[in-house]
C-alpha cells in the first residue's frame, strides 16, 4: 500500500509518499509560505528536486498541488489518487487522550481539538491539514500519529511536577514529552541491532536535533523523557533554553522590562546554543567552526550542550537502575561525532569505551562502542515518516 505521510505546520507542509511493502520513499517534498504566497518543492525518487512558486492561500490548495505533483503524467509516481491507500498525519499533542495512534474520525478530531490548549502553535495546524486532506481525498482512510503517545507509559512519579495538584486536576499540567515517534522507532531498531527482545532492554535515546530530547526506554516503554508540558524543557537546544531556574524569569522580566510574551520569545527563540554562543548560530556546523576559530562563546555553548546531555543520561541510568544501550539520533546525533565523543567522555563510569574509527562515520547505523564497552553506544538515523507510515498501515489494514 502507498501511504501519504503529512507533517503540517501553520505555514508549511512536509510530505512523503511511501510504499509500505518495500518501505521505499516514492516521492517527497515541502510546501512553504502557505497563506503568504506559496511554493512547492517536489522530488520523485531518483529524480530531480524542483521548486516552483504556487499560490497557496490555504492548506487545501497546498495539498491539491501535492496531489497534482504525485499524479503528474511526467514526473508523478502514481497514476491516480486510487493508488494512495491511506494518509498518516503527524499530530503533535495527544494529551492524556491518546496513548497510541488513532484512525481519524469526527470524534477523534474533537479529542485532538481539546488538546489545542497544550500545543497552540501545532495542533490547530495539524487539524487544518487533516481537514484539507479529508476534503480532497474523501474515502481514503487516515490516521493520526502523536508525538506524545509513546510517553503515555511514564509513571506518575516521572510526569508529575512539584506544583499544586489542582493544576494537574484542572488543567492537566504534567510532563507529556515529545519526539515519541522517533524515540519509539530508534529504540526498537536498537533492540534489533543488538539482538535482544525489545521487552528486555534498557535503552537511553538521545534525539539531538534543532529540538532535542532524551528518553529512558525500559523494556520497550518510555519511563521518562526530558521534554515536559511543552517542548521547552530539558536539554539546551538550538534556540530553546531547556531547564532553567524558574525564578530567572521574574529577575529578567524586571531588568529587561519584559512581559510574558517577551519572556517566552526569549526562552524559545533567543536562548539555547544560539543565545549561549552570543548569536553565532543555532546550527552546530557553524558553532563548531566558530569554536575551532577560538571563539569562546561558541566553545561554551558546545560544552554546556554536551554536559547537559551527559547529566540526563546519568539520571536516566539511575531511573532504570542501569542502562544497556545509549543511542544517538537526529541531525546532531547522527552527524556530529565530536559531540558524541564529548558526551561519552563523561560516561566512563558506566564502562563506556568509544571506537574512534566507528564514531567517525556519519548518518548511518553503527555501533560506536568497542566490543569491551559495558554499555553499547550506537548511532541510528531516525525516520519519523517511515514510523508514521508503519503505524498508519497497522491501523487501516
Ligand atoms: P529538527 O528536525 O529538530 O529541525 P534535525 O534533526 O534536522 O532538526 O537537526 C538539525 C541540526 O543538526 C542542525 O541545526 C545542525 O545543528 C545539526 N547538524 C546537521 N548536520 C550536521 C553535521 N554534519 N555536523 C554537525 N551538526 C549537524
Image (cartoon, rainbow, N blue to C red):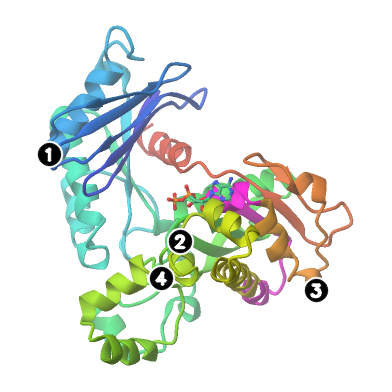
Do the residues bearing badges 1 and 2 touch, measured as CB atoms within 8 Å? no
Chain-order first, disc 3 or disc 4: 4
On residue 349, which mark appears?
3
Chain-order first, disc 2 or disc 3: 2
Crowd around label 4: few <14 · some 14–19 · many ≥20 (10 Å): many
Assign the N terminus to one quadrant of the image.
Answer: top left
- Indicate if the residue with disc 2 has its beta carbon within 8 Å of ligand 1: yes
> Residue, x 55% and y 58% (percent of image)?
287
Chain-order first, disc 1 or disc 4: 1
Residue 269 placement: quadrant: bottom left
| Residue marked by disc 4 | 271
Q: Give the number of callouts.
A: 4
Per the image, label 4 sits on a secondary structure element best described as loop
Do the residues bearing badges 1 and 3 touch, measured as CB atoms within 8 Å? no
The answer for how far apart the CA atoms under marks 4 and 2 are is 8 Å
Q: Nearer the viewer, mark 3 or mark 4?
A: 4
The answer for how far apart the CA atoms under marks 1 and 2 are is 29 Å
| Residue marked by disc 2 | 238
> Residue, x 81% and y 51% (percent of image)?
356
Specify the segment rendered in magenta.
314-336
Q: Nearer the viewer, mark 1 or mark 2?
A: 2
Amino acid at each position: 500500500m502507498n501511504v501519504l505521510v503529512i507533517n503540517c505546520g501553520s505555514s508549511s507542509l512536509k510530505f512523503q509518499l511511501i510504499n509500505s511493502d518495500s518501505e521505499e520513499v516514492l516521492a517527497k517534498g515541502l510546501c512553504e509560505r502557505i497563506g503568504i504566497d506559496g511554493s512547492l518543492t517536489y522530488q520523485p525518487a531518483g529524480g530531480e528536486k524542483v521548486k516552483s512558486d504556487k499560490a497557496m492561500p490555504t492548506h487545501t490548495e497546498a495539498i491539491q498541488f501535492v496531489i497534482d505533483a504525485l499524479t503528474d503524467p511526467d514526473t508523478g509516481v502514481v497514476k491516480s489518487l486510487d493508488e494512495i491507500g491511506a494518509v498518516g498525519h503527524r499530530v503533535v499533542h495527544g494529551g492524556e487522550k491518546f496513548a497510541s495512534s488513532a484512525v481519524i474520525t469526527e470524534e477523534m478530531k474533537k479529542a485532538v481539538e481539546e488538546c489545542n490548549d497544550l500545543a497552540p502553535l501545532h495542533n490547530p495546524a495539524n487539524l487544518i491539514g487533516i481537514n484539507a486532506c479529508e476534503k480532497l481525498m474523501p474515502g481514503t482512510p487516515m490516521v493520526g500519529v502523536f508525538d506524545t503517545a509513546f510517553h503515555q507509559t511514564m509513571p506518575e512519579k516521572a510526569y508529575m511536577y512539584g506544583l499544586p495538584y489542582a493544576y494537574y486536576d484542572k488543567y492537566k499540567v504534567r510532563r507529556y514529552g515529545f519526539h515519541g515517534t522517533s524515540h519509539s522507532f530508534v529504540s526498537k531498531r536498537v533492540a534489533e541491532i543488538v539482538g535482544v527482545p525489545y521487552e528486555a532492554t534498557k535503552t537511553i535515546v538521545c534525539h539531538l536535533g534543532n529540538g532535542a530530547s532524551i528518553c529512558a526506554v525500559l523494556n520497550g516503554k518510555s519511563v521518562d523523557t526530558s521534554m515536559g508540558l511543552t517542548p521547552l524543557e530539558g536539554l539546551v537546544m538550538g534556540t530553546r533554553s531547556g531547564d532553567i531556574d524558574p525564578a530567572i524569569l521574574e529577575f529578567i522580566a524586571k531588568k529587561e522590562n519584559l512581559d510574558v510574551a517577551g519572556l517566552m520569545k526569549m526562552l524559545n527563540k533567543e536562548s539555547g546554543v544560539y543565545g549561549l554562543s552570543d548569536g553565532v548560530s543555532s546550527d552546530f556546523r557553524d558553532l563548531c567552526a566558530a569554536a575551532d576559530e577560538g571563539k569562546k562563546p561558541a566553545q561554551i555553548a558546545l560544552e554546556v550542550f554536551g554536559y547537559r546531555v551527559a547529566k540526563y543520561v546519568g539520571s536516566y541510568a539511575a531511573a532504570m537502575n542501569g542502562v544497556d544501550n545509549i543511542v544517538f539520533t537526529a541531525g546532531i546525533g547522527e552527524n556530529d561525532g565530536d559531540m558524541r565523543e564529548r558526551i561519552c567522555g563523561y560516561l566512563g563510569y558506566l564502562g563506556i569505551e568509544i571506537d574512534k574509527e566507528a564514531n567517525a562515520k556519519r548518518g548511518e547505523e553503527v555501533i560506536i562502542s568497542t566490543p569491551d564497552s559495558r554499555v553499547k553506544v550506537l548511532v541510528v538515523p531516525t525516520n519519523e515518516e517511515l514510523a508514521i507510515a508503519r503505524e498508519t498501515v497497522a491501523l487501516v489494514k
